[in-house]
Amino acid sequence: MEIPSVVIVLGGVVVGLGAALTGLGGGFLMVPFLLFLGFTAQKAVGTSFLGIVLISLSALVAQNKLAHVDYKVGLLLGVGGIVGAQIGTHLLEHVSTDQFKNIFAMMLMVLSVYLLVKT
């Protein structure tokens, strides 16, 4: 099934807004969107990273103009993230799409409860 480009672009707009407002990188919205479109878990995660790179670069430019970027902390987080991303990619190969959906939903619920309780 061919997905209309306009649907994907509009989904990207929603993800970009969500990423800019929350700082979560957009994956929390992009991955479920891609799963909804019929992607496997592995393809959804991999594809979302390309979109996230573009969204993140754009957001970085905008946030930098507002002097909202701590480069030292961001680079250190990035180094740790590179290691984690390599490990996570290999682990994801052993998870079915259905299992992934459950894990992803649980992570979002835990994060949501944490944010609700923390405020």
Image (tube, rainbow, N blue to C red):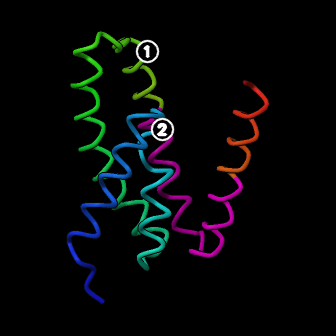
> Foreground mark, 1 or 2?
2
Identified at 45% across, 25% down, the residue is 77
Q: SS for tag 1?
A: helix
Cα separation, mark 1 vs mark 2, equals 16 Å
Between 45 and 9, the one lying in front of the other is: 9
Q: Is residue 91 magenta?
A: yes
Identified at 47% across, 71% down, the residue is 35
Q: Does the magenta stretch include residue 83?
A: yes
Asked whether, in this view, residue 15 is left or right of residue 99, the answer is: left
User: Residue 103: which numbered mark, if any?
Assistant: none
Q: Give the range drawn in magenta.
A: 81-106
Q: Name the residue under label 1.
A: 73
Task: Tell me the quadrant of the picture where the C terminus can be found.
Answer: top right
Q: Can you name the residue that lies furthest to the right here?
A: 117
Identified at 74% across, 34% down, the residue is 116
Q: SS for tag 2?
A: loop
Identified at 43% across, 20% down, the residue is 76
Q: Name the residue under label 2.
A: 24
* Image x and y of residue 65, in percent: 22, 15
Asked whether, in this view, residue 119 is left or right of residue 18, the answer is: right
* Image x and y of residue 15, in percent: 38, 50
For label 1, the crowd category at 10 Å Cα-Cα, with few meaning under 14, some 14 to 19 and many 20 or more, is few
Instruction: Please say if 118 is above or below 39.
Output: above
Instruction: Please say if 63 is above or below 115.
Output: above
Circle nearer the N terminus (1, 2): 2
For label 2, the crowd category at 10 Å Cα-Cα, with few meaning under 14, some 14 to 19 and many 20 or more, is few
Magenta segment, principal secondary structure?
A: helix
Amino acid under label 2?
Leu
Task: Tell me the quadrant of the picture where the N terminus can be found.
Answer: bottom left
